[in-house]
Amino acid sequence: MLFFDPKSHHLGDNSVIDWQPIETAPRDGSRILVAMSDDFMQHQTRGEPRDDYCIFVRWVGQIGYWVDDYRSFVKDADVTHWVPAPVPPQATAHQRMRDAAAISRHRKDDV
């Protein structure tokens, strides 16, 4: 979960992001990070309302909505700005070995 200061254009870790208006967001299924609107945040029931909440979404043209990583629908009116999703870091050699071992164990369980 990321928090965004819409006034300074900083993420919670103080990195500066070049936010774009949601109207310019790609609608080709690319995963992007969006800032939620104040109105959306005021109607949330989990915790205290915030005006600096960001989520990852993809545009699904067949239904005409953004869909988040949990497959919840997000309307255009609920988001204000976007940036491309960051590229995840490459796995370390240790992580690749650990993942290979887990896959091997899983395959043995299936036999």
Image (tube, rainbow, N blue to C red):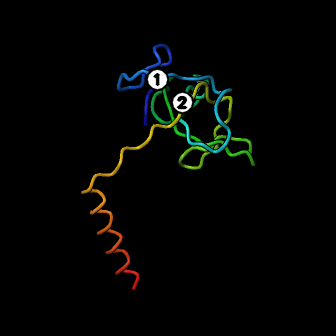
Label 1 sits on a secondary structure element that is loop
Q: Residue at x 68, y 32 (%)?
A: 76
Instruction: Judge left or right: residue 99 versus residue 62.
Output: left
Q: Is disc 2 surrounded by few (<14), some (14 to 19) or many (20+) residues within 10 Å? A: many
Label 2 sits on a secondary structure element that is strand
Q: Is disc 1 surrounded by few (<14), some (14 to 19) or many (20+) residues within 10 Å? A: some
Q: Residue at x 46, y 24 (%)?
A: 4
The quadrant of the picture occupied by the N terminus is: top left
Give the residue type that dot 1 points to: Ile
Vertical position of residue 94 compared to residue 63: above or below = below
Vertical position of residue 76 compared to residue 61: above or below = above
User: What residue does disc 1 label?
Assistant: 17
Give the residue type that dot 2 points to: Val
- Labels 2 and 1 touching (C-beta < 8 A): yes
Q: Quadrant of residue 15?
A: top left
Vertical position of residue 95 compared to residue 2: above or below = below
